[in-house]
Amino acid sequence: MYLKFFKKFLTRLIIYAILTAGAILVLFPVAWLISRSFMRLEDTARDIWIPNPFTLEAYIEVFTQQPFFRYLLNTSFVTFMGVLGTLLSSSLVAFGFSFLRFKGRDLIFLLVLSTMMLPGEVTMIPIYRIFYFLGWINTFKPLFVPSFFGSAFFIFLLRQFFLTIPRDLVDAAYIDGASSFRVWWQIILPLSRPALTTVAVFSFLGHWNDLLGPLIYISSTEKYTLSLALLSYKNLYFRYTNLLSAATLISILPCIIIFFLAQRAFLEGIVTTGLRG
C-alpha cells in the first residue's frame, strides 16, 4: 500500500515539475517584456529584472509619438467585422450541411473541406487581383469581407457540434411551422454557445494578429493595424526596447483578456467538438 502511494506521489511530482518547467519557459519572454516596458531606456541595457525606477514613460511615448490609438481602433474594427462575418456565415453553412437535405450535400461538403488543403500562397495573387479590380486596395474590406463567405475549418468545427444536437428538436420546430432561418437563429445558435465561442476566439486571434493581410492591402499609415504598426515600430525604434515592449504588451493584452473571459466555454467547445463529432 505504501509502495503504491509512493509511486502515485512520485508520478504527480514529476508531472508537476515538467508542467512548472514548461510554464516558466513559456512565461519567460512575457516576464521579460513586462520588465522592460516599465524601465527607462538607459536601464534596458542593464542586466536587471526589476525596474528601478519604475516608470510609465514607455507607455506614454507609445501613444504620443505615433497614432497608436488609431491603430488600436483600426484593428478593433477589422477584428469585430471579421468575427461577426465568420460566426454568421460559418454557422449558417454548417447548419445547411447538418440539417438540410439536398442532392450532393456530402459531395459539396467534401469540396469545402478540400479547400483547406490549398496553401494560402496559391490563392494570394488571384485574390489580390479580384480586390484590385473591385477597388478595395488600401481599404479595410479585404481584411474582413472574406469572413462573410465562411471558413472551411470553422464550418467543419460547427457542423461537428451541430450533429450532436437531437434531430427531433429540429424536426419538431419544422412541424410547428418554423422556417430554416428561424430554426438556425432561434434554436441552433442558442444551443451552440461553446462551439460558437471557440470559433469566435480563434477568429479573434486570427484577425487581431494578422500581419500578412494588412501588409499586402494597406499602404496608408493612418489605416495601419496593430501588427503592421508594430512592424513599423521595429524598424523606427529598434533600439528603444522599452517602447517596443510596451507596444507589444498593449497589443497582446486584448487577446489575453478575451481568452480568460471565454476560457470555460472555449475549452468546453474544444472538448465537445473534438470528442462527440
Image (cartoon, helix red, strand yellow):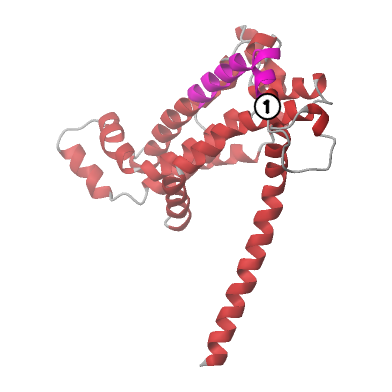
Quadrant containing the C terminus in the rendered view = bottom left
Q: Relative to 262, does residue 56 appear above or below in the rendering?
A: above
Residue 224 to residue 116: above or below: above
User: In x, y percent, where is residue 273?
Assistant: 45, 51
Q: For residue 112, say whether it is visible.
A: no
For label 1, the residue is 247
Q: Nearer the viewer, residue 252 or 220?
A: 252
Q: Nearer the viewer, residue 275 or 11?
A: 11
- Which residue is at a point 59% across and 16% down the rendered structure image? 69
* Range of magenta residues: 58-82
**Where's residue 47, x and y in %?**
83, 43
Q: Is residue 77 magenta?
A: yes
Q: Is residue 13 visible?
A: yes
Residue at 40%, 45% in the rendered image: 194
Main SS of residues in magenta: helix
Quarter where residue 221 is shown: top right
In the rendered image, residue 14, in percent from the top left (x then y), is placed at 64, 72
Q: Is 136 included in the stretch rendered in magenta?
A: no
Relative to 100, is 219 on the left or the right? right
Residue depicted at 35% across the width and 52% down the height: 164
Q: Residue extending furthest top?
A: 135
**Quick one: SS at disc 1?**
helix
Q: What residue is rendered at 54% in x and 21% in y? A: 78
Which one is nearer the viewer's eye here, 142 or 57?
57
Amino acid at dot 1: Ala
